[in-house]
Amino acid sequence: MATAPVRHDEVHGGHGHVEEGWFRRYFYSTDHKMIAMQYMFTGMAMALIGGFFAYTFRMQIAFPGIDVPGFGTVSPNEYNRLITNHGAIMIFWVAMPVLLAAFGNFLIPLMLGCDDMVFPRINRLSYQIFLLSALILIAAFFVPGGAFAGAWTMYPPLSAKAEYGLAPLGATLFVLAVALEFVAFLLGGINFVTTTMNSRAPGMRMYDIPMAVWMIVIASILFMASVGPLIAGAVMLLFDQNIGTAFFNPDKGGDPILWQHLFWFFGHPEVYVVLLPVVGIVAEIITVFSRKKMFAYRTVLYTAFGTGVLSFMVWAHHQFIAGIDPRMANIFTITTLLISIPIAEMMFVYIATLYGGSITLATPMLWALSFIATFLIGGVTGIFLGASGADIYLHDTYFVLAHFHYTFFPIAIIGTYAGVTFWFPKMFGRMMNERLGKIHFWGTIIAFNCIFIPLFVLGAAGEHRRIFDYSMFPELMRPELRAMDKFATISLLVMLGFQPLFIFNFFYSLFKGPKAGKNPWQANTLEWTAESPPPHGNWPELPRVYRGPYEYSVPGREQDYWPQNAPN
Amino acid sequence: MFELLGLPAASTYAKDIDFVFELVFWITAFWFLLAQGILFYLVLKFRKKPGVRGQYITGELKSEKRWITIPHMAVLVFDVVILFFAVKVWYEVKQNLPDAPDKQIVRVIAQQWAWTFVHPGPDGQLDTPDDITKVNELHVQVDRLHHFQLQSKDVLHSFSVPVFRLKQDMIPGRVITGWFTPIKTGSYDIQCAEICGVGHALMPARIVIETADQHAAWIAQNSGVAVASATAR
Amino acid sequence: MSARPIATTRSTSGMPTGRLAVWWVIASEIVIFGGILGSYVMFRLSHDAFATQAAHTNTWIGAFNTLVLLTSSLFAVLGHKAADQGDGPKAARMLYLTSLGGIIFLLVKFGYEWPTEIHHGFTISSHPFWSFYYTAAGIHAAHVLAGVVIMLIIAPMARRSLELHRVELIGVYWHFVDVVWIFLFPLLYIAK
């Protein structure tokens, strides 16, 4: 489309732009950047809660019966409540808002060269519904019976019948919170996909779209296509809980396994929904800090599509021994092992992008590289579990838990730190402190591995999940095993101990950090051509695009980067 | 490998499940070390040096793509090998139900929060007056085929015997059947492997694997009926 | 209310943003209804008792309601045509007729059909068939109601020839609601 760049104030006719009041600006904004911040800060606040829960229940496991500082003693019921809500919070109220909603909202209009999302008011509504869902989840802790304690997977009949679960109101609020969170993200997805399809800068063809945007869009489509059955399931579970229907109640002809299918049909694609945005973020960081064009951009894109499609065909590997027809397991073990191939391919391509580069190990790059290194462990340990024969033994053990923490932690935590340290200058107009960033990085990464490697061993030794105290299982009380649990917990304390460095760095830099220019990293993508931070409307004149996003180190050019909007 | 963890292989198929685990371990260790090694090597080799620019490599050329497609194919081959053994073990443990003239059928009933085990008495049949019902203790005989029937009285539970490498979820309203043949005597943990409420960690059970004589004696002791001459295998 | 961003006015894909958004909403709804109906079909295939219960749904009422919805969709199409031609008042009239169809559908269902079934003891908790029946049809009815409400907001604006493109958008949504019913009707009323 060869139209001239459009002036923001021409179309808006000067808005009649009254200076926005404080409330309108921070709490009722329709600006995509502000909505991104709302999601990000809410997600990070929820991470503090989820992390506190992890601290508490790990203390209980390492030192059974201990009076946990800051919490008190952990009863069996409280333990179940803590692990249930830790899981749900980290996935639905930390990973999704930060990776998908915050980065998606912030980056998509900026990377595409337009002034906002296509439907700003729906965008605002999506955050409001999301916030409501978080409040409902937290409210469950304060109602009679307390919060739900039947694992984040909510399997009935435990989650459906009051007399089994002891927290009937909490269970209802939990399902309601999850369902509302789904609605919020469906609404958010409308904006991501429509804006990317329709509002790109003139000259930006499909293969000129930065990988971060592609991945967030594919993730949104994946979410939309998979969440429906679970929304239906959530309605069914709410009815079972509250009006006596029999969808999942075997006493009245229902089937508990139906819930599992509905849950995991969504649950498996969901892990790719949170993975893909980070894969995109890491792509942006690696290319900038190795000054290299992304290796085989189209391959990465098609691999992402392939992963998305395949992700719909693997779900029952979560249910191998759940009582499904054993013949079905064979199909799912095949598809599950096959899906390791496109993921492996993505990792290979990212490693290949480093070849021949000129690599700077700034803090964002450290995080991006550590994502690859740690996610590799998560990926290969998935093979143990996808092989149905081995899963007979490994299901419900800490091996599973260590596997998914080696995927989720790189995704939710490393991915977040990578993205925040990279785009902080653009978001807030200041630079974060490199030295603090590096200390925080090493402390976090080393401690993280020390937490979860022992858990693989413990899982293989027979330690089962969701057990608050192993003292009733003599084979698990061996001192070597207890020592490993203590080591893991102490490593968690160390890791948590390093996080204040990031929090301090973040807030200090926010107010006192050195001012960042428009493009401190000398990157190509459009967001780096806007002011830091970008004003309402992003640019006074919207940009036009002339090339792809990864033209680094182009031979014959003086500079080793070539912004997308530079005419030559 | 599991001996290192102090976990004996006490059923006929435990070693087969262990084999799949170990196979995956060595294959994934190889790929993992290779990928990590290359990652670290490249990061170190291509550190920014003064005056040296990055190279412009698109990855679209066939010669470049080969670096991805060849490992890609290799991963596929290894996956197929793993699949073969995984499916083989799966079939053996979960799809196949072997039979033997002297098989024992035991019923395992889980509830919030205890296990009830119903053993056939001296007559070798379940659901007869001489059945032996025990709470939280399952007695079986070494080298003898056992079929189990799993039932739940309330919520989902899961019958897990780590030394057998066996696990099977239990669903209220259904009877799920499976099998094992113990090959090692001793007394071991039984765990519930599906969160079943506040007492999920408080329902341990023990499996007691006895020799033919020990088992016959136990039956005699518990059913109060004279022992018929047991055909020890 | 702030003015539309430039982003909303662009159309790189060729499709106007409003229409893209409606198709996105429909796609997500298809998966939701697919989940409920898929579960229902799986249940039905493995439980013979379902057929016994299903015999008690009122096929004539189901058929009447199907006719009502299909007719209302016809009016939605006529409304779209009028909007395309710029005839705001006519488009509005057609939308009012469409929503009338929706209202009749709801009145028949909630005013007669369900009360009768409940009176005969076929409540939502009496049998899994009825759990599915009321849940699936209920969620569908909620979508009918939402559609009627939205139409009653768009129609007065259309009469003043404002935002005429929205007539098409709500029409697309309404056809979707119709199509869901076309799946529900045989599953709940005819398969006996």
Image: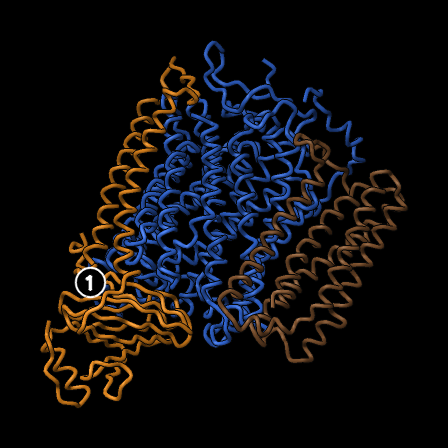
Q: Is residue A395 above or below residue C51?
A: above
Where is the C terminus of chain C found, in terms of image quarters? bottom right
The blue one among the chains is A
Q: Is residue A537 above or below residue A503?
A: above
**How many tags in the picture?**
1
- Chain that bears disc 1: A
A160 relative position to A361: left or right: right
Q: Is residue C27 above or below residue A485?
A: above
Quarter of the figure with residue B52: top left
A368 relative position to B81: left or right: right
Residue at coordinates 88% horizontally, 43% vertically from top-left?
Answer: C88
The brown one among the chains is C
C148 relative position to C15: left or right: right
Residue at coordinates 49% horizontally, 11% vertically from top-left?
Answer: A557
Chain B painted colour: orange
Whole-percent x and y of residue A331? Answer: 38, 51
